[in-house]
Image (cartoon, rainbow, N blue to C red):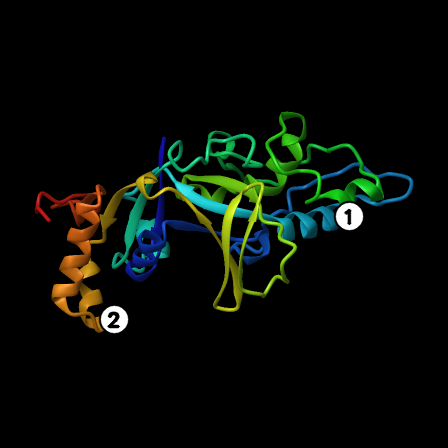
Amino acid sequence: MILYKYMSFKSACSVLNSSSIGFSCLEDLNDPFEGTAICLEESDDLSSKLQKNAYRNRLSRNYGVLSLTRNPLNSLMWSHYGDDHRGVVIGIDMKKANLLDEISCVIPAQFGEMLYTSTIPQNMLPSSSTGTLMSVGDEFKSFRLHEFDLFKNAFLMKDLAWGYEEEVRVVKNIRSFKGSRYSESKFRNDAGNWNQLTVLGRPLYCLSIPKESIVEAYIGCASYNNVIRLGMEESYYIKTRKDWKLSGIDVQLVRRKEGTWDLEISDHKI
């Protein structure tokens, strides 16, 4: 299974040079309503709202989300996440990247299909005790089918308006005992080897993946503008693309299909 990640040209260079891919917390994603589909039954001690907020906060701080998509030629995605068609879409082989593994992933890619609905689901989950709420992040480190309803509601449900993204997610435990949310450090846990960075004031958890798991790269139809915008030398820009190809990545140029709004692969050779 190959899934795709849209990014800027500069970010693509960083991903390919470091052989790592970034996971973000729920609270740092661009939809402020992430995690609000958690619905729990009232209990004698804890209200549904209190349980929901506690779960949402602890899930956000202890788990990282890798957002991927099935389609590398989506014009809206190129505009929203591919630096206005000036960036790159990388294709990652999920098996080679170990992102199908049910031991190291809380939600592996094969279970990460997003569910888009026009209304918030009201499927009530069983109420939790205070002890259960406090153990979130300690206890759940691998995929558990009997706990999937909770993680599905928290991580895999969004408004229908987001359906154009065709998103598939991978969720991993990012808990570290080495520092705070805003510290920068390298650490290892049961989910893999991480490099925690701060980007635009938000933490980014970069997971090391095998170099051979990055198998495709699609270069945007306006990517050449980066030569001027980023102050690159044209020779460096061209050399970078050729280096990717020489490393075994299938590099393709994207263009608009003549007479349509659709995108297609260019027949221009790199």
Identify the residue at image location x=37%, y=42%.
210
Say above or below: 124 vs 270. Answer: above
Look at the numbered disc 2 and give the secondary structure of its residue.
loop
What's under tag 1, amino acid-wise?
Answer: Lys
Q: Nearer the viewer, residue 84 or 141?
A: 141
On the image, numbered disc 1 is attached to which residue?
A: 49
Say above or below: 198 vs 124. Answer: below
Where residue 178 appears, as percent x and y from the top left, is 63, 58
Outermost left residue: 268
**Separation of residues labelled 2 and 1 (CA atoms):** 47 Å
- Residue 9: image quadrant is bottom left
Look at the numbered disc 1 and give the secondary structure of its residue.
helix
On the image, numbered disc 2 is attached to which residue?
A: 230
Q: How many marks?
A: 2
Where residue 64 appears, as percent x and y from the top left, is 55, 48
Q: Nearer the viewer, mark 2 or mark 1?
A: 2
Say above or below: 87 vs 256. Answer: below
Outermost top residue: 146
Outermost right residue: 44
Quadrant of the snapshot with the N terminus? top left
Where residue 225 appears, as percent x and y from the top left, is 19, 65
Identify the residue at image location x=55%, y=39%.
156
Circle number at residue 214 = none
What's under tag 2, amino acid-wise?
Answer: Leu
Where residue 119 appears, as percent x and y from the top left, is 59, 40
Identify the residue at image location x=80%, y=38%.
128
Q: Residues within 10 Å of mark 1 (few under 14, many from 20)?
A: some
Q: In the figure, is residue 18 to the left or right of 33? A: left
Identify the residue at image location x=65%, y=55%.
177
